[in-house]
Image (cartoon, rainbow, N blue to C red):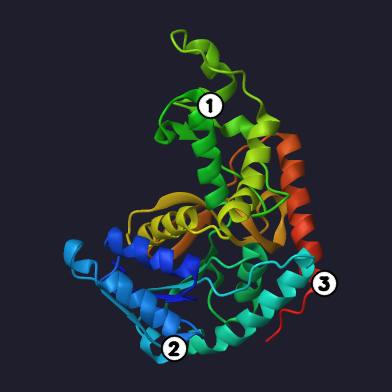
């Protein structure tokens, strides 16, 4: 079981991930690394002072030398998009930040599992897989795992059931070209289109699929407009992914990884359901989807490939 987790980046996202890991008691040691050393120290101290009510978790700041022996490394370092800045410009800025991180962290942690959280997460996952020298099955991006959580949360609100009863995924890019393969979505084992008609005692509004997908894509922007960041949902999401990477028993999650021919797509990182455990990604699952959904997935792959062509990922 993973006992040591290093988080690179102690901003709102990185610190919330550290807090979530601590609350869930998913590591015995959490190391926080940031170029702003005082920020890392303050966040680590604040979390550490709550551990008497949680359990024995050593949370502390450090540098890359302190990351040695980590079972999982989570990378959140990056900058948010500024007003007037294009998505492509942001991609190059964060790709350049990753260039400085990769050689240092892989030297310290050659055997770790790597979880990419910073955006654009699919581009950075691709970059890490192509340039780090770490086997690709040990490199995962949170990808559409967060989008999937937003999908399940929204559908549960509409259907008036707990989100644990909603099953389905968001595929593709963690971004504008993501989509829901509705053909595999269900509520309590029933196709979503038929659920409202089957529940006679509760008045459930007619499902508007476009509205749900619009909600998923715009949630991040709406939250940022209101509070200037998103951190809680991605913190819980990343902690849940780290939990799945602790055990020999496998889990199935929609995470970003380097595709090698699945659905006829390769040489790009995006999200489809993956079987993963403490050894990393064991397999990607080609869930049966419709021809229209396959076309949407290939479109998402093409959108990401277009960005990758226009950025310099080389170390």
Tell me where residue 219 appears, x and y as whole percent. Answer: 61, 46
Which quadrant holds residue 174? Answer: bottom right
SS for dot 3:
helix
Can residue 297 be seen in the rendering of this structure?
yes
The mark found on residue 234 in the picture is none
- Quadrant containing the C terminus is bottom right
Tell me where residue 120 appears, x and y as whole percent. Answer: 66, 65
Classify 214 as above or below 76: above
Q: Which residue is mark 3?
A: 310
Residue at 56 percent across and 24 percent down: it is 192
Can residue 168 be seen in the rendering of this structure?
no
Mark 2 and mark 3 in contact? Answer it, CB < 8 Å. no
Classify 72 as above or below 225: below
Q: Residue furthest top?
A: 200
Mark 1 and mark 2 in contact? Answer it, CB < 8 Å. no
Classify 149 as above or below 175: above
Side of 25 relative to 196 (left or right): left
Give the distance between the C-alpha atoms of the residues marked 2 and 3, in whole angstroms.
30 Å
Tell me the mark number nearer the camera, choosing from 1 and 2: 1
Q: Which residue is mark 1?
A: 158
Tell me the mark number nearer the camera, choosing from 3 and 1: 1
Tell me where residue 289 appears, x and y as whole percent. Answer: 65, 36
Give the distance between the C-alpha atoms of the residues marked 1 and 2, in whole angstroms.
46 Å
Q: Of label 2 and label 3, which has the lower sequence position?
A: 2
Residue at 60 percent across and 56 percent down: it is 224
Tell me where residue 150 appears, x and y as whole percent. Answer: 54, 43
Q: Which residue is mark 2?
A: 64
SS for dot 2:
helix
- Quadrant containing the N terminus is bottom left
**In the foreground, 83 or 210:** 83
Q: Of label 3 and label 1, which has the lower sequence position?
A: 1
């Amino acid at each position: 079981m993973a006992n040591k987790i290093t988080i690179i980046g102690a901003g709102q996202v990185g610190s919330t991930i550290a807090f979530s890991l601590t609350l869930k008691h998913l590591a015995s040691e959490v190391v926080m690394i940031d170029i702003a050393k005082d920020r890392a120290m303050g966040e680590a101290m604040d979390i550490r002072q709550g551990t008497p009510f949680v359990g024995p978790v050593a949370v502390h700041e450090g540098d890359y030398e302190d990351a040695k022996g980590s079972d999982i490394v989570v990378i959140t370092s990056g900058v948010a998009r500024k007003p007037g800045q294009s998505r492509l410009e942001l991609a190059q800025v964060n790709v350049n930040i990753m260039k400085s991180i990769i050689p240092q962290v892989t030297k310290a942690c050659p055997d770790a599992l790597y979880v990419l959280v910073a955006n654009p997460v699919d581009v950075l996952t691709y970059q890490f897989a192509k340039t780090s020298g770490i086997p690709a099955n040990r490199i995962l991006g949170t990808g559409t795992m967060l989008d999937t959580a937003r999908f399940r949360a929204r559908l549960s609100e509409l259907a008036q059931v707990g989100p644990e009863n909603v099953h389905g995924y968001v595929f593709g890019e963690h971004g504008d070209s993501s989509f829901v393969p509705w053909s595999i979505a269900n509520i309590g084992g029933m196709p979503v289109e038929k659920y409202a008609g089957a529940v006679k005692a509760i008045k459930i509004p007619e499902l508007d699929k476009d509205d749900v997908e619009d909600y998923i894509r715009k949630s991040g922007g709406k939250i940022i407009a209101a509070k200037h960041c998103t951190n809680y949902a991605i913190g819980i999401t990343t902690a849940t992914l780290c939990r799945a990477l602790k055990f020999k028993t496998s889990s199935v999650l929609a995470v970003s990884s380097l595709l090698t021919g699945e659905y006829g797509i390769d040489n790009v990182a995006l999200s489809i359901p993956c079987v993963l455990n403490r050894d990393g990604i064991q397999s990607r699952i080609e869930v049966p989807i419709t021809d229209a959904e396959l076309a949407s997935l290939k479109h998402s792959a093409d959108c990401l490939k277009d960005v990758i062509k226009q950025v310099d990922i080389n170390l």
